[in-house]
Amino acid sequence: MLDAFSRSVVSADAKTAPVGGTDLAGLRSYVSQGNKRLDAVNAITSNASCIVSDAVTGMICENTGLIQAGGNCYPNRRMAACLRDGEIVLRYISYALLAGDASVLDDRCLNGLKETYIALGVPTQSAARAVAIMKASATALIGETNSPASGGKRFRKMETTQGDCSALVAEAGAYFDRVIGAVA
Ligand SMILES: CCC1=C(C)/C(=C/C2=NC(=C\c3[nH]c(/C=C4\NC(=O)[C@H](C)[C@H]4CC)c(C)c3CCC(=O)O)/C(CCC(=O)O)=C2C)NC1=O
């Protein structure tokens, strides 16, 4: 598993070069924007159960066959496994966002996941849909673009210092897309 720092060392070593130039500039920005990154991670982790349960609910509302006999969220044992998988995926995305690198997500979560799903009959398009809904809510929480209308009774705005967090929203979004690309 790599992070922004070890990644720059690995790539410099592969070129037998010192860490410098754009790599150092990238790390400087990683450090100087560090508090924003921690706020973004917190936006995900402190809303995790809401993000996951809402996404799985939405996936089922769009495809109610999932909770009928023969559906992959039936019976409760499978429903629980599905919610647990949502929590796992979101947790690894939060690690990747913290590290500024996708390798922890790739190596410890996504590696072999599609094959596992196919072997178990977990519908990969539905799994991808749940992750897409998690992406929508997580990125709205990070960017504080969520609205009372979409949040309903559970509306919660993260109260962080206002500023430009578009790069972190995009980076987090890319990790969700990575999961979708790996399972779909
Ligand atoms: C460390 C990383 C890690 C991951 C990612 C992981 C995933 C994972 N999900 C599994 C099952 C499962 N995953 C789901 C998930 C779903 N079913 C649906 O219809 C939805 C589309 C979806 C939820 C969004 C279900 C229902 C099962 C149980 C399938 C079965 O036993 O028939 C299994 C088989 C073993 C088990 O049931 O516990 C694994 C290994 N395990 C890990 O250790």
Image (cartoon, rainbow, N blue to C red):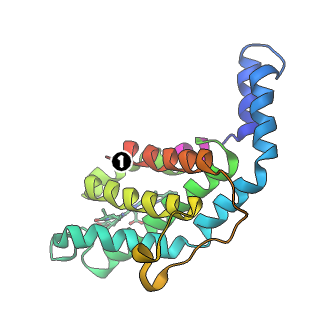
Any part of residue 9 in sight: no
Image point (40%, 73%), residue name: 150
Q: 165 or 176: which is nearer to us?
A: 165
Instruction: Tell me which amino acid carries mark 1.
Output: Val
Q: Position of residue 119 (x, y in %)?
A: 28, 52
Q: Is residue 105 magenta?
A: yes
Classify residue 76 by image quadrant.
bottom left
Q: Secondary structure at mark 1?
A: helix
State whether the magenta stretch is mostly helix, strand or loop: helix
Q: Is residue 138 magenta?
A: no
Q: Which residues are magenta?
A: 103-107
Image quadrant containing the N terminus = top right
Q: Is residue 52 left or right of residue 72?
A: right
Image point (38%, 42%), residue name: 181
Q: 180 or 151: which is nearer to us?
A: 151
Q: Position of residue 90 (x, y in %)?
A: 52, 61
Q: Position of residue 108 (x, y in %)?
A: 55, 49
Q: Which residue is the site of mark 1?
A: 183
Image point (40%, 76%), residue name: 149
